[in-house]
Amino acid sequence: MSNQSFEDEDVRIKLDVDGVTVVDGEFRVEGQHNWIRFPLSLSPGSHTLTAESDTGATLKESFQVPGNEARYAVVNYWAEDDSPELTWLFQREPVGFA
């Protein structure tokens, strides 16, 4: 997870997977590209992620976890012109920035 918004330097984000809260905390923008990892052990199969910020941004995504293969979900918070949003990536490799 990461706060990518210089307009909202501090944002509280709550993230649930399958109705269970797995993250509930404050995220500072700092240098912007500072992703915080929250490793989860999920069973193979279908899951649902829901996220909500204290600024009103919401996100709901369904995803499949394959057996014996790592996956990386990335939730980013953005806000520009009073339009906060949460975006989602689901990929085979860890997030990186060069």
Image (cartoon, rainbow, N blue to C red):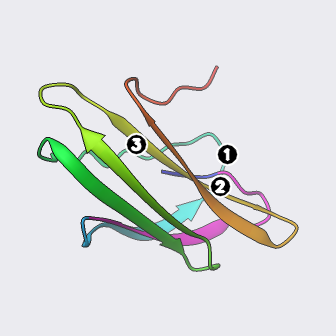
Position of 47 with respect to 73 (left or right) is left
The residues tagged by marks 3 and 2 sit, at their Cα atoms, a distance apart of 19 Å
From the image, state whether disc 3 or disc 1 is nearer to you.
Answer: 3
Q: Is residue 61 above or below residue 58?
A: above
* Residue that appears at 40% across and 42% down: 73
Name the residue that disc number 3 marks: 73
- The kind of residue on which mark 3 rests is Ala
Dot 2 surroundings within 10 Å: few (below 14), some, or many (20 or more)?
many
Name the spot of residue 85 as percent of width and height, x first. Answer: 66, 63
Residue found at the very far right of the displayed protein: 81
Characterize the local packing of mark 1: few (<14), some (14-19) or many (20 or more) Cα atoms within 10 angstroms: few
Give the mark, 3 or 2, whose residue is nearer the N terminus: 2
Quarter of the view holding residue 31: top right
Report x, y in % for residue 35: 50, 43
Magenta run includes residue 16: yes
Q: CA distance from mark 3 to mark 1?
A: 18 Å
Front label number (3 vs 2): 3
Secondary structure of the residue carrying tag 1 is loop
Give the extent of the magenta segment.
4-17
Label 1 close to label 2 by CB (< 8 Å)? yes
